[in-house]
């Protein structure tokens, strides 16, 4: 019975040392910052790959360029008829 209490007291003492030690808190904080920065880097790399593909298609595929102009600038060709539907609530 006495051994169990001593073990719990030692464990509590060890946990308190870890919690109240400034170096350990800084280490944990830096670990979370590194994880956040790594996620940010991976997202930026993903966005970079998407933009590279978009640039490739814009340079090499005329139909992609036309589709982008139509979707982003809402442009219609001269021989097209544009239909607009109004929805009343």
Image (cartoon, rainbow, N blue to C red):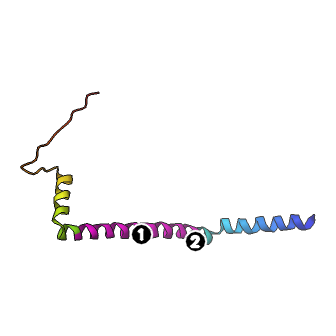
Instruction: In this rendered view, identify the residue nearer to me: 85 or 26.
Output: 85
Is 30 magenta? The answer is yes
Looking at the image, residue 83 lies above or below residue 69: above
Q: Residue visible at 12% across and 50% down? A: 76
Quick check: 2 above or below 82? below
- Closer-to-camera residue (81/15): 81
Tell which of 44 and 6 is nearer to you. 44
Label number found at residue 27: 2
Query: Which secondary structure, mark 2?
Result: helix
Which of the numbered marks, if any, corresponds to residue 42? 1
Position in image of residue 18 (x %, y %)? 68, 68
**Real-space Cα distance between discs 1 and 2?**
23 Å
Mark 2 surroundings within 10 Å by alpha-carbon count, few (fewer than 14), some (14 through 19), many (20 or more): few
Q: Is residue 89 left or right of residue 2?
A: left
Going from N to C along the chain, the mark reached first, 1 or 2, is 2
Quarter of the image holding residue 69? bottom left
Quick check: 6 left or right of 15?
Answer: right
Picture coordinates of residue 77, whole percent (x, y): 9, 51
Whole-percent x, y for residue 15 in the image: 72, 66
The region drawn magenta spans 27-56
């Amino acid at each position: 019975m006495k051994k169990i209490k001593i073990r719990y007291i030692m464990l509590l003492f060890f946990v308190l040392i870890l919690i109240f030690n400034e170096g350990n808190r800084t280490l944990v904080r830096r670990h979370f910052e590194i994880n956040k920065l790594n996620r940010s880097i991976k997202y930026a790399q993903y966005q970079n790959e998407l933009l590279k593909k978009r640039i490739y298609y814009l340079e090499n595929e005329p139909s992609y360029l036309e589709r982008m102009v139509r979707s982003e600038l809402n442009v219609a060709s001269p021989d097209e008829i544009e239909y607009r539907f109004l929805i009343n609530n």
